[in-house]
Amino acid sequence: MNNGQVFFSEIKAYFNLRKPKGDKPTNIYLVVRIGGVQKKYVTGVKVYPAQWNMAKQEAILNHRLTELDLYNNVIVNNRLDELRLRFLDFKCYICNNPKLLDKAHTIMKEYLYRDEIMEKKENALIWYRKAVDAPSCNIADATKQNYITKLKILEGYVRTLNVDYLTFDMINARFLKEFQDWLFMPYDDKGNIRSTRTIHNTIVAIKTILCWADEKIGKEVCREIKEFKPTKVRQEKTKVVLTDEEITQLYKAKLTGKQKEIRDVFILQCEMGQRFSDMCNLNNGKLSEDGNTYTIVQQKTMQQVTIPLSDVAKQILSSYNYNMPVYLLDITDKELKKIAKEAGLNREVLITKEEKGRPVTNREPLWKHISSHLARRSFVTNWLKAGLDSHIIKGVTGHKTEEAFKRYDKVSSEDAAQVMLKAQKKNVESSLQLKEHELTIQEADVFATTISTLQKTYKQDVEKVKEQRLDDTLNMVASLMEDNVDTHSIAKAVEKADFRVSIDNGSMGSIIMRKDTKKRQVKFEKTDEAE
């Protein structure tokens, strides 16, 4: 700012319309002039140009306006009166502190927008923590606990920024990117580094939480945060599953008290394929009339699913009178590892996970990796290995998308090969059954031979009938000849009886034959034409 004099009367302010000649509501600006420098400030209110009194510097209020226009204009005038008072406070302050004239417009902003500034100076982490814990926060308990854990990680990052606390005006896409970069740094003195899966999940959760305060951080900033793409997962941690034999082995283990109850709920989860949260609410389900299915409403998705009950599931539910015990997740997972170890689930599994940013594969006993979520994963995998269609399994587990379902599909290459071998074996068995059926058809030739014999017998019978007819015809001819019937009439009578009269050139006599006879002729008598 110039070093010239600045007089109290020269510090002026007035309101101006952005589009004074328009016919639509337009923004009102506060124009402030200090020592020859003029700047405009947004008031946050609008008015119809026709309803603006430039001389009085206020919106018009009269009986000719509609109720809605009056309502809006009252809001305008209240806001303008508030800004006038703040300008006067600023003017008094700057007159008492003339050395701050070069920062006058910066100070002016603080006076005009002190409410908004104070709101942005609010401790964002405290606000988010209250939002998560609020009764109106309609999310599952497991999700809520996950968000709290991720906020604690964010708090650790904020402590490295040398600021008193995180404010809303600090939050943007750049802040999120810097937070993600920090997550890749060692988090303890031993040099341990978070896996890319952990970092990815942390950023996804924080993105969701940050945008809860979209009105505080701004719609545009919220959009940038939503568009921010978290780091891609380099190496997914190997996930194991229990075989049907191992589930049976665990079920047969002799246990008592709390361990028996936790084991039974876990086995039931293996048989039903539901989430741990749904097992905790299992007692609210409904058993079908025939006792073969159980219907529940899943807590996470609010989706109703009907679960077929295996014999083992029926046994467990019946033994607890359909009132299953409930334990906390961390207690359940801790006890399950002890139970699995005692049950002898020592199968070595190859576990690949990130250590200090690099994938490392180790052989570890199965019991170390037993958790409640393993039950749901085992349910899906074992049914897929058995050849059941994935869409049918999804109908029971409640997975809405194929992508979500695939995270539970842990069929290994070896398992896939075994499924194919079983399928090939079934094809061979089907082929053998078909061949056996073909052999049966071949054996039916005996039946065909029998039919052929019957046909020959039938033909022989037909021949006998025809021979009898021939004899009858010959008798008829003899009778006609005895009655001195003329030859022409006798020949016609023979034709009607399906026979024909032929001349034997060798003997010059007449021969009576069947019409269907080609080679064999039947001579009945020689006749002398002279007689």
Image (cartoon, helix red, strand yellow):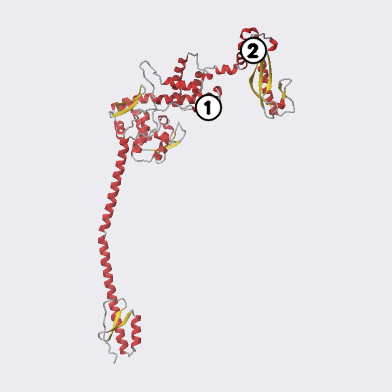
Per the image, the residue denoted by label 2 is: 90
For numbered disc 2, what is the local secondary structure? helix
Q: Amino acid at mark 1?
A: Arg
Q: Amino acid at mark 2?
A: Phe
Chain-order first, disc 1 or disc 2: 2
Per the image, the residue denoted by label 1 is: 223
For numbered disc 1, what is the local secondary structure? helix
Image position of 90 (left or right of 200): right
On screen, residue 148 above or below 270: above
Q: Residues within 10 Å of mark 2 (few under 14, many from 20)?
A: many
Image quadrant holding the N terminus, namely: top right
Where is residue 171? Give x, y as percent: 51, 21
The picture quadrant where one finds residue 392 is: top left
The reply to whether residue 362 is visible in this rendering is yes
Front residue of this view, candidates 364 and 530: 530
Where is residue 318? Give x, y as percent: 36, 35
Where is residue 141? Give x, y as percent: 45, 26
Name the residue at 72% across, 22% down: 54
Where is residue 48? Give x, y as percent: 69, 27
The reply to whether residue 269 is visible in this rendering is no
